[in-house]
Image (tube, rainbow, N blue to C red):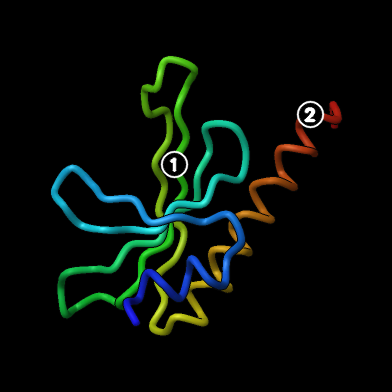
């Protein structure tokens, strides 16, 4: 089983996307044009999984790309991805409520 299969199975709505360099990564849409991404790192001096947030404007231009965490295991990467999604959604609700 590929590492991507684990995330597609355990994170509802996630899918495998291939980058312009031909490397697969996991993308999970949390809001319109906002995504949590999980990538497999290439170097040996980093933890294997990198979790980041990416957003785009209505024209498809990237407006934000922020790395949030790195994880050593599949389970930790899944947990971090869910936490980042929850934090991002909760912060947007806070702003939209006018607080």
Quadrant placement of the C terminus: top right
- The local crowd at label 2, few if under 14, some if 14 to 19, many if 20 or more residues have their Cα within 10 Å, is few
State the residue at coordinates (50%, 44%): 35
Snapshot quadrant of residue 47: bottom left
Percent of width and height locating residue 32: 59, 32
Residue 54: numbered disc = 1
Percent of width and height locating residue 63: 42, 28
Q: Is residue 51 left or right of residue 17?
A: right
Quadrant placement of the N terminus: bottom left
- Whichever of labels 1 and 2 marks the residue nearer the N terminus, that label is 1
- Compare residues 73 and 25 and report the one nearer the observer: 25
State the residue at coordinates (41%, 72%): 5
- The local crowd at label 1, few if under 14, some if 14 to 19, many if 20 or more residues have their Cα within 10 Å, is some
Residue 36: numbered disc = none
- Compare residues 21 and 85 and report the one nearer the observer: 21
Query: Does residue 19 lie above or below 9 as drawn?
Result: above
State the residue at coordinates (42%, 84%): 73
Q: Secondary structure at mark 1?
A: strand
Q: Secondary structure at mark 2?
A: helix
**Total numbered badges shown on the rendered structure:** 2
Query: Does residue 67 lie above or below 2 as drawn?
Result: above
Q: Is residue 24 left or right of residue 83?
A: left
Snapshot quadrant of residue 20: top left
Snapshot quadrant of residue 13: bottom right
- Compare residues 59 and 17 and report the one nearer the observer: 17
Q: Kindly check if marks 1 and 2 are in contact, taking CB atoms under 8 A apart as contact.
A: no
Percent of width and height locating residue 90: 75, 47
Q: Nearer the viewer, mark 1 or mark 2?
A: 1
Measure the alpha-carbon separation of dots 1 and 2: 19 Å
Q: Label 2 belongs to which residue?
A: 96
Query: Does residue 64 lie above or below 59 as drawn?
Result: below
């Amino acid at each position: 089983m590929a590492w991507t299969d684990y995330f597609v199975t355990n994170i509802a709505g996630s899918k495998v996307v291939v980058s312009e360099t031909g490397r697969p990564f996991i993308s999970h849409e949390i809001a319109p044009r906002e995504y949590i991404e999980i990538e497999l790192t290439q170097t040996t001096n980093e933890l294997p999984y990198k979790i980041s947030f990416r957003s785009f404007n209505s024209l498809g231009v990237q407006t934000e790309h922020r790395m949030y965490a790195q994880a050593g295991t599949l389970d930790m990467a899944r947990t971090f991805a869910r936490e980042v999604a929850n934090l991002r959604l909760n912060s947007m609700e806070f702003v939209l409520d006018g607080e």
